[in-house]
Image (cartoon, coloured by chain):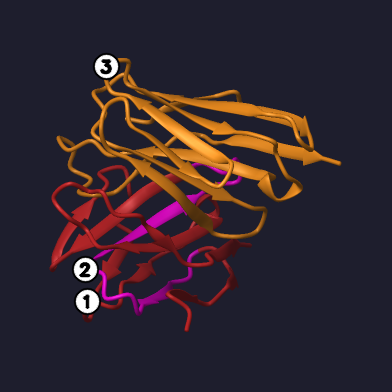
Amino acid sequence: QQPVQSPQAVILREGEDAVINCSSSKALYSVHWYRQKHGEAPVFLMILLKGGEQKGHEKISASFNEKKQQSSLYLTASQLSYSGTYFCGTVDPNSNSGYALNFGKGTSLLVTP
Amino acid sequence: DTAVSQTPKYLVTQMGNDKSIKCEQNLGHDTMYWYKQDSKKFLKIMFSYNNKELIINETVPNRFSPKSPDKAHLNLHINSLELGDSAVYFCASSQGGTLSNQPQHFGDGTRLSIL
C-alpha cells in the first residue's frame, strides 16, 4: 500500500528549513528516502530501520516513528541543490512485492535564491 | 563505470509493436527491479527478481515480461505496446537482504513514447 506524503509541493528561499512527512496505514518495517532531480534517476538519501531512529546526511536528516507509522525528512538551511522531488518508500514484509519499495507520490521542493 | 545502466535511453515506437529494454548492473547485487514512472511522477514497482525468483506486481499486464539471463541483467520485454505504456521505466538493484536495509541504485531510465 502506498504511503502518503505531505506536503505535495513546497517553495523555499535559500537558507530556509522544510519538513516532508511520510505516513502509512500499515505497520512500517523500514522507510527509505530518495531525491529525484528533473530528468534524472532517483538517488538514495537514507534508510531508517528502527522506531525512533534518526539519521543525518549533511544538513538533511530524518526521523522514524514506528508507533505512529510515519517518518519525517528535515532539510535545514536549504541550498539550491536541494531542489527536486523527494520520495519516501516503504517495505511491507507481508506483501508479495519482495524487497521492492512502495513509493509515495513525492514532494516537489523548489529552493529559490 | 556506471553502476546500473539501461539501454536505450529513449524509445519511440508505434502502438502494437514489441520492444525490449535492457538493464545491467555491475554492483554484484542479487536483487533487481523494474519500476514505471508515469507522467505524474508516480513510481510504481513492476517486478522484482532475486536469485531466480520472480515476484510480479499483480497489476502489471502480462504483455510485460522480465527476462534475466544472469544475476547482473534484468531485461524488460513488452508486447503489443499501448498508448498507456508511455512512461519512464527505471531499472534498479540492491543487495536484497532479509531485513531489506539496503539502498536501491537506479539506472538513468528509459523514456518510452508510444505514437
Question: Which chain's residue wears label 1?
Answer: B
Residue A53 image offset from top left, x and y in percent: 33, 31
The residue positioned farthest toward the bottom in the image shown: B1
The reply to whether residue A19 is visible in this rendering is yes
Which contiguous range is marked in magenta?
A: B16-42
Residue at left offset 33%, top offset 75%: B27
Q: Which residue is mark 3?
A: A67
The one nearer the camera, B1 or B57, is B1
Q: Quadrant of residue B67?
A: bottom left
Q: CB under 8 Å between callouts 3 and 2?
A: no
Q: Which residue is mark 2?
A: B30
Question: Which chain's residue wears label 3?
Answer: A
Q: Nearer the viewer, mark 1 or mark 3?
A: 3
Question: Does residue B82 show up magenta in the picture?
Answer: no
Residue B72 image offset from top left, x and y in percent: 28, 78
Q: What crowding class fits label 3: few (fewer than 14 Cα within 10 Å), some (14-19), or many (20 or more)?
A: few
The one nearer the camera, B91 or B66, is B91
**Chain for colour orange:** A
